Image (tube, helix red, strand yellow):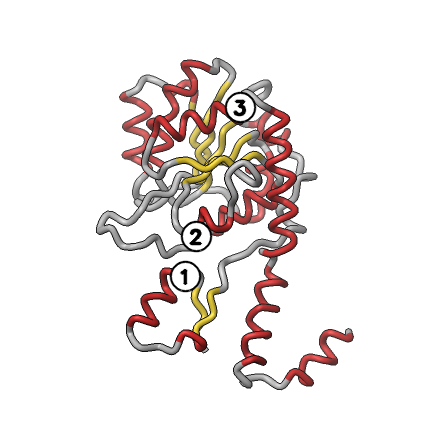
Amino acid sequence: LIVVVSKALRDQLVARGVPPERVLVNPNAVDPARYHPGMDGEPVRRRLGLAGRLVIGFIGTFGPWHGAEVLARAVRPVTAQLPEAHFLFIGSGSGMPAVQAIIAGDSVGARVTFAGLVPQEEAPAYLAACDILVSPHVGNPDGTPFFGSPTKLFEYMAMGKGIVASDLDQIGEVLSHGKTAWLVRPGDPEDLAEGILALARDPDLRRALGEAARDEVVAKHTWTAHVERLLAKMIELQLLDPQVLEPVRAG
């Protein structure tokens, strides 16, 4: 049994001769007890001077696939139309200087806060400080399918916030436009800005999408569900005796 986080990886293995029935696609997941809508983000907002702002947040390591530069290019068109908007970049990485250069070049530094790296246990509070969460992933430069399973996606969903995300491969399979998120064209700052503005101007839509995303992640994308899928596949392939699990499930 080979476990992968995306269909793109499964397809690569099958193309190399691995029997498809021996491959389980099991995306990443989240602990909804740690990431939840009841988390208080006000202390973070006060500490960062964001009280009264409509905060658009991103968390990540600024890898080339994260699309943080695309988000940086969306800051000016969003803030030009929405004076109360403020962008919060959480995390750090090799791509951060390029993002900061775009922000400086567009003269929108006053509308952006870089929180830097934060301890993992504090991440939920930082996400709770945001009104909208953005996952602006971009495709691979060589044109190969996007093969990741962004953990941030499931963390965003668990927080019950309005999400704007790229309609990119499995991201567009996990999220549904108009139901659990607002999906945009990958790598398109203008479309990303329009998506952010759509949610910023409609708090009822933000709330509805956030609630639906939370329900979806609790139903399908917890680590418990992740393990259950793995165990079910092992039983299907006769790699595990289901009787072994009976005492665990009974307890």
The relative height of residue 230 versus residue 28 in the rendered view (above or below) is below
Q: Residues within 10 Å of mark 1 (few under 14, many from 20)?
A: many
**Mark 2 and mark 1 residues within 8 Å of each other at the beta carbon:** yes
User: Which numbered tag is attached to residue 170?
Assistant: 2
N-term mark: 2 or 1: 1
Q: Is residue 97 above or below residue 230?
A: above
Q: Is residue 92 left or right of residue 163?
A: left
Q: Which mark is residue 7?
A: 1
- Residue drawn 47% across the image and 27% down it: 196
How far apart, in angstroms, are the residues tagged by discs 1 and 3? 33 Å
**Residue drawn at x 55%, y 71% as measured from the top left:** 230
Relative image position of residue 69 (x, y in whole percent):
32, 34
The furthest residue to the right:
250
Label 1 SS: helix
Q: Amino acid at mark 2?
A: Gln
Q: CA distance from mark 2 to mark 1?
A: 8 Å
| Within-10-Å neighbours for mark 2: few <14, some 14–19, many 20+ | some
Q: What's the amino acid at mark 3?
A: Ala
Pointers 1 and 3 in contact (CB under 8 A)? no
Residue at (49% x, 29% y) in the render: 56
On the image, the x and y values in percent for residue 6 come to 42, 60
| Res 49 visible | no
In the picture of the structure, the residue carrying the numbered disc 3 is 200
Where, quadrant-wise, is the N terminus in this rendering?
bottom left
- The residue tagged with tag 2: helix, strand or loop? helix
Which quarter shows the C terminus?
Answer: bottom right
Residue under the point 41% across and 42% down: 167
Q: Is residue 128 left or right of residue 140?
A: right
